[in-house]
Amino acid sequence: SKQATHSSSRPSSVNTLDTYTQVPRPRPDQLFNMSPFGSTEEQESLIASNVRRVAPARRSTDAEQLSRNVACGFILAVLSIVFLVALFEFSFVVPPGEVGIVVTLGQVNSFTSGLHFRFPFVSRLELLSAKIQI
């Protein structure tokens, strides 16, 4: 006949398996030194076996570094030029004594002297004198 796994007649020892977790029960002196990864030696061997072996990184030569610096400088210069062109296309200044007329897709807006902004390529700016002519 089969015995129950949680029988009270079974002697309690260190190597018996816990009926719920099916893992060996630790001795009381092992409770403070427990780690989910085993002993320190086991941890070190596990780490050493799982370390990926890669070739040492190849150091770049001065020519490669110079080439990268030139490419980055060129990209930065082009982006700066694009930014400045966009800034000048989006903004306009109406000088004192003049009125700015901006026509955007058929809609007309007037501006007094000062700094103003508009949409480039879809709006046209006309500057007209605001002086009274005799």
Image (spheres, helix red, strand yellow):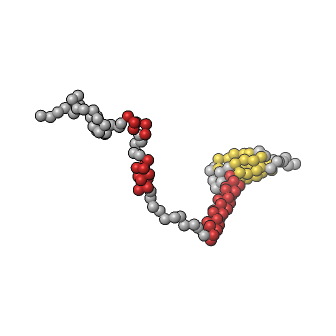
Q: In this view, does 98 lie to the left or right of 7?
A: right
Image location of residue 83, percent across then percent down:
67, 56
Q: In this view, does 76 lie to the left or right of 133?
A: left
Q: In this view, does 29 lie to the left or right of 58?
A: left
Write the residue at 45% across / 61% down: 53
Q: Residue furthest bottom?
A: 63
Write the residue at 65% across / 60% down: 76
Write the residue at 40% across / 42% down: 36
Instruction: For residue 52, say whether it is visible.
Output: yes
Q: How many labels does the image show?
A: 0
Give the position of the N terminus as an image quadrant: top left
Between 111 and 57, the residue placed more toward the observer is: 57
Between 47 and 13, the residue placed more toward the observer is: 13
Location of residue 69 by image quarter:
bottom right
Between 80 and 60, the residue placed more toward the observer is: 60
Image height of 83 relative to 10, above or below: below
Image height of 10 relative to 134, above or below: above
Q: Residue furthest top?
A: 8
Between 13 and 129, the residue placed more toward the observer is: 13
Image location of residue 100, percent across then percent down:
75, 49
Image location of residue 117, percent across then percent down:
70, 48
